[in-house]
Amino acid sequence: MGPISRRLFALESRSGWIAIAILLVIGLFIVPALNLMVPEGSLFHISTFWVATLGKYLCFAILALALDLIWGYAGILSLGHGAFFGLGGYAMGMYMMRQIGDRSVYGNPDLPDFMVFLNWDSLPWYWWGFDQFWFAALMVVLVPGLLAFVFGWLAFRSRITGVYFSIISQAMVFAIMLAFFRNETGFGGNNGLTDFKDILGFNLSQDSTKVGLYVVTTIALLLVYMICRAVVSSKLGRLLIAVRDAESRVRFLGYSVTNAKLFVFTLSAVLAGVAGALYVPQVGIINPGEFTPAKSIEMAIWVAVGGRGTLFGAIVGAFTINGARTYLTGVAPEVWLFFLGALFILVTLVMPQGLVGVYRSIRSGELKDAIRRRIQRVDV
Amino acid sequence: MKSAIKTVAAVGALAGSLAFSGMAHAADTIKVGVLHSLSGTMAISETALKDVMLFLIDEQNKKGGLLGKKIEPVVVDPASDWPLFAEKARELIEKEKVDVVFGNWTSVSRKSVLPVFEELNGMLFYPVQYEGEESSRNIFYTGAAPNQQAIPAVEYLMSEEGGSVERWVLAGTDYVYPRTTNKILESFLKAKGVPAEDIMINYTPFGHSDWQTIVSDIKGFASAGKKTAVVSTVNGDANVPFYKELGNQGIKAEDIPVVAFSVGEEELAGIDTGPLVGHLGAWNYFMSVDSPENEAMIKKWHAFIGDDKRVFNDPMEAHYIGFTMWAQAVEQAGTTNIDAVRQAMYGQTAPNLTGGIAEMNTNHHLSKPVLIGEIQDDGQFATVWETDGVVVGDAWSDFLPESAKLTADWTYPWVCGNCEKPKHLTN
Amino acid sequence: MSVTNNADASRMRTVFFSILFVLLSLLAFSFPAHAQQNDAALNAALSDLNARSFKAKTAAVQALGVYGDARAVAALEALSEGRLYGRKSDKSVVIAERDGKIYRLTDPATGVSAGEATSRELKKIIANNKLRGLIRGVLGQLALSSSDSELRRAAVENVISSPTGGSLALLKSARDRETEDDIRARLETGIATLELGSDDPALRRAAVDRLADGNDPEIKSLLERRLLKNADGSFVESDAQVRAEVQEAVSRINDRLALFGLAEDLIFGISLGSVLLLAAIGLAVTFGVMGVINMAHGEMIMLGAYTTFVVQEVFRVTMPAEAFGFYLLAAIPAAFLVAATFGILIERGCIRFLYGRPLETLLATWGVSLILQQMVRSLFGANNREVANPDWISGAISIGGGVSVTVSRVYIVIFCLVVVAALAAFIRYSRFGLQMRAVTQNRGMASAMGIRTGQVDALTFALGSGIAGVAGVALSQISNVSPNLGQNFIVDSFMVVVFGGVGSLWGTIVGAFGLGIVNKFLEPVSGAILGKVVVLVIIILFIQKRPRGLFALKGRAAEG
C-alpha cells in the first residue's frame, strides 16, 4: 500500500467503508439493474420515476455535503448556497440550451427561443463558448467558485460572522434571484432554461440516459464525500473546527482564519455548483426559483435534520426531508406543511445532533441511559 | 436496545403500510390526476381549481361515472415549486397511472411538466389564459390564447363605445405571459397606426408591492391630452397593492381605464372594489352572466363547497369545459387510452356556461366567446361587450413575424404543433 | 369581429351632439317650468336608459341632461353609481337601495316609493366608462350654477376634465357669477386651456400668460402640443410671438416640475421607508435584544393582518354602519394581543430551549412559520381576504405638480412614527424597558443583578411579536392579506435591521428610511427590479465596511 492509498483508506473507519460499499452496490448496480432489466409490472421493478427522483435526491445530498462542510466544520451558515447551486445549474443549462440548435420552436440555430422572442439579434457575450461541453463544465466550477471567493473575501476579511453572515448571504441570493427574474438579464427570465433535448449526444428522454445520469451522480456523491472527508480530517479541517468553536482565539494564536475560511467556503461553493450542474439535466429545468431564499434555508435544514458536522448526516438529511416531501405531497397534500414544520421544530429541540446523533446515542447506549435517568427521576 | 429496535420496527411498519395504502385501490376506477399547488405562492389561485375538479368528478360520479366505472381523483401538491411539478407529473403518470391530468397555472410550471407529458405520452388539460406560442400533442389548452383575450379587449377600448383610447400603457409582471402579450399588442397597435411614443411598456417583479412610482408615472403619461388606457398583465399577488394604489391616487376608470387579463372574480374577492368600479377585465367567462346553465352550475358549486360566497371564475369554467369534453371523448372512444381519447377530442363540443358552444380544435385550443366586463362594487364584472360568436384560439400569433408562419394542427396531414409545412404529406 | 367604427364620422357626430346639447341645456336653464311640464319626454328618456345598446343609453342620458331637474339628476346619479335597475316584471326603471336581502325601490319619474323587490326580480342597468364620463360632465354642467360652493368646486373640475363643445361658454358665465376666489381662479385656468385653441392670437397670448404660472403636467403637455407641426409642415401655433411665449412658459413649468419630481421621490421614499420600518421594528426588538433570528416574524405581521380582517368582519355584523370605519382602531390592540400571545407561545414552547444557539433558532422558527402559514391557509382559505380602507383614510391630497400623496400612506407614516416613539419611550422609561436594556447589554451581569432573564426574554419576544402584529394592521391597508403576506417582508426586514445596526432602535429607523429613499430615487433611473438589486448590493458592501451596521452597539454586546 502506497502512502496515498493508505491516507485514502484512513479517511473512514472500517464500518464506514463497509457502509459505503453496501450503499454503492445498491446505488450503482441494483437500482439501475432493477430499472433497466426487470420488466415493468414485476414486483422488483424500479420505475424511471424513482430513478429520476433518486437522482434528484443525490444532487441534493451533494449540496447538503457542501453546506455541512462549512456549517458543520467551520461554523459558517450560508443561507445563500442556492446561489452557487443555481449558477452551476445555469451553466449546465446554457450548454444544453445551445445543444438544442435548430430543433427549437422558432428553429433559429444561433439563438435560444427566448432570445428570438425578445428580438435579440445576436448571442450576448456571456453565452459564448457554452456550445462546448468542456467550457460549460469549467464554468460550472469557475462561476460559483469565483462568486464565493469574492463574496467570502469581502465578508471574512471584515470578520462578518454568525447570523450576520447568514443574513448577508441571504441578501446575495435574493439579489441574484431578482436579477435572474429580469428577462433583460438574458437567462430566460422566470421560465429559465427548459426544453432540453440532449446532453453529450444522449437523448434526455431516454431511460438509459436517465440511468446514466443517475450513475454519474452517485459516483459524484462518493467523490464529493471523499473530498469533504479528506478536508475535514486534514490539518486544515482541525483548524476549521477550532475556528468554529473559538474564532478569536485561533486568530490570536497566529493562524490565518480568513484564508482558511475563504478556502473552504470557495470549495463548498464549487461542490454546490457541481450538484446544480448534475441536477438540471435530471429535472429538465433551471429557473430563478432555485434562488429563492426559502430554498437556501431549507438546505440548511437538511443538514440540521441529518446531523451537522458529520458529513454522513448531511446525506441522510437530504434524503429524509426530500423523501418526506415526495411522499407527503402525494399522500397528504393539504397538511404536509404541518408535518414538515413540526419535523424542523422537533429535530432542533429534541435531536440537536440530528438523526445521525440519535443513531449514535442509540448505539452507544447513551439514549437508553438518558431515558432511564429520566424515568428514575419521575419515580423519585 | 431491544425496545429501541421494536420502536424502529413499528415506525417502519407504519411507514410501509402508509406507502402501500396508495396501491390498495382496485383497478376498476378511472384515475384523474389533479396537479395544482396547494401551498406556496400559487396556492392563492390554484386551490380553487383543485376544489372545482373534485366537484366536477363528484358530479360525474353521481351520474354513474364513466364507462361504468367510478372516477377517482388523485390530488398531489406540487407546492409552487417548478421542478417539483415535473416530479409530481411523473409520479401521477408513471406511479399512479392516471388516465388524464388536470392542472398547472403558471407558464413555467407548464414548461416544466411538458417534457414529462411528451415523454410518457400523458394528457394534460391546462385551464389558464396564457401566452400561446406552444402546441403540444399531449396538452389541451382550455384557457384563452392572446387572440381570445388581449386583442378583443384592445379593440374594444379603441372603439367609440370603449372610449376611443389613443395612448396605451402596457404594464405587466416580468415573465413570459406579459412579455408575449405585450409584444403581440405592441405589434397590433402599431399595425392600427398608434405611434411608438403613445405606447409605454413597464415591467415589475413578482409580488411587487410598492406601486407609488409606477402609478404616478402612469398618471404623468396620461396627462398628454390623449385618452389613455392601461393594459395590465400584472400577475396575482401584485394586483391588490396595484389596485389599492390606483384607488388611493384617485385614478378613476372614466379617466384612465385599466383592463386586466389576470384579474378575475377570485382576485377581486380580496379587494374592496368600491374605488375600482369601471376598470375592466377581459375573459371568456364571468360569474355574473345571466344564463340558466350558469345559474345551475353556481348553485351546485355552492352546495358542494358549502359556502355560497365562493366565486366561480374563468379558469374554473375552463376546467368544466375541459372535463366535460374529456368525459364525452372517453365515452365515445370507449376507453381511456390516451391516443384514442385524443382522437375523440377533436371537434368535441360542450356548452359554455355563458351561452353558446365551445369546440376543441385540432390545434388543441378551444373556440370560445370573449367577454369584456367592468368591475362592479360587489366584486363582480358586468358584461359591457361580447363577441357575436366564438373566437378560435390561435396557438401561434399572427402578430409576431417568427410565429405567424407556424401552424399547429394535430390531424393528418399536419400532425405537428409548430411546422411551416405539413409533416406527413412529404412521406 | 371588429368594434372600431369610422372614427371621423363618429367625431363629427360627437361634436354635433355636444353643440346641440349645450344649446338645449341653456334653453332648459332659462325655462325650467317648461321642462317640468314635459313629463312624457322625461318618462321616455328614463325608460330608454334600460335600452340594450349603449348608443340608446347615451342618447337618453343626454336627453335627461336637457331636463336638468332634480328627478333627472337623481336618475343620472343612480345610473352612474350602479343603483339604477330595470324591474323584470314590467320593464320599468327604478332606483333601488339595498336593505339586507331586499331592495327598496323608488320610481325616478315621481320620486315616490315603488315597493320592494328581491335581487332576482331586478336587473342592474349597466353604465360603462363612457356613459359615466358623460354623466359626470352633464351633472357638472348642471351643478355649475349650484348654490353650494363644494358642489361647484367639484363641478368645475368635472367640466374641465371632460370638456365638450359648449364648455367654454358655460365656464365663462360661471366665472362671471362666481364669488369664491379659488373657484374663480380654477375657472380662469380652465377657460385659458380652452382659449389656447382660440382663433384670436391676443386671446391665445393671454391664455399662455395665465397658464405659465401653473405647475400641472397636463397643462404643460397642452402647451407643448402648441409647439408641434401639423402634417403639412406648418406650426400648430401659427403666431411666432405666441410660439416664443409658449416655449418660455413650457420651460418655466419644466423647472418647477423638476423640483416637484424630487419632492415626489422623497415622499415616496419616506412612505416606503415607513412600511419597511413597520415591518422591521418588531424584529429589531427580538433580534436586537435577544439575538434571536425569528424567521416567523413575517407570520406575526400576517397574523396582525388577519386579525384586522376578523375585527372588520365582526364590526360589519355587530356595529352600525357609521361606526364601521373605526374597526381599524379596534384592530390595533387586538392584533397586538393575538400576535403577542403567539409570540409567548413560540418563545415558551420552542425558542427558550435554544438560547445561545442562534442558528438553530433560525431553523426552528422557520418550521414555526411553515406551520403558521398552513394554519392560516386551512382556517381562512388560500386566497386573499378583503380588508377595506375606511373612508377616513381613503383618497389623496394633491400638492401640485401632478404630485399627490395618498391619505392612507400619510397615516401609515404617522402611525409608524407613533409606534416607534411609544416603543422608544417604553424602553427608555419603564421598569421593564430598563431590564430589557440591561439584558441586551450584558446578559450574564443582568442575571447576576437579579433580573429574571427568562421572563424578560419571554416578554421581550411578546413585545416584538405584538408590534409586528400592529404593523400587520397598517400593512393590510396597502397590501395583500394572504397566507404569503409575511414572506414578502421577511428578507426586507432583516436587511433593515442588519443595515441599521442590531440592537439599535435609532439605527433601524435611519436604516428603514434610508433604504426606502435610496430605493425610490433609484427606481426611476434603473427600473423597479434593478433598483432593488442595487440596494441589496449596496447593503452587502456596506456591511463589509461596518460589520455591525450603521449604529453599532459598543462594548461587550458587540462580541456576539
Image (spheres, coloured by chain):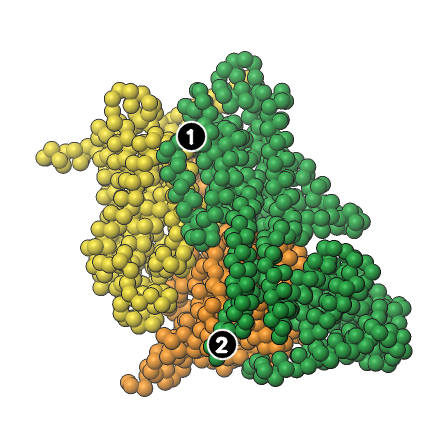
Amino acid type at mark 1: Arg
Q: Is residue A349 above or below residue C434?
A: below
Chain A shade in the render = yellow
Identity of the residue drawn at 38% across and 48% down: A176
Dot 1: element: loop
Using the image as rendered, state which of residue B225 and residue C489 is in the foreground.
Answer: B225
Residue extending farthest left: A2
Using the image as rendered, state which of residue C501 and residue A293 is in the foreground.
Answer: C501
Amino acid type at mark 2: Ser
Q: Chain of mark 2?
A: C
Identify the residue under disc 2. C234
Q: CA distance from mark 1 to mark 2?
A: 66 Å
Q: Position of residue B195 (x, y in %)?
A: 47, 72
Query: Left or right of B229: which side holds A43?
Result: left
Dot 2: element: loop
Q: Dividing the picture into quarters, in which one does residue C5 lie?
A: bottom right
Nearer the viewer's eye, disc 1 or disc 2? 2
Spot the green chain and give its letter.
C
Q: Position of residue A41 (x, y in %)?
A: 36, 63
Q: Position of residue C220 (x, y in %)?
A: 56, 61
Spot the orange chain and give its letter.
B
Query: Left or right of B344: which side holds C173?
Result: right
Judge whether residue C434 can be spotted in this image.
yes
Mark linked to residue C548: 1
Residue extending farthest bottom: B425
Badge 1, how many Cα within 10 Å: few under 14, some, many 20+? many
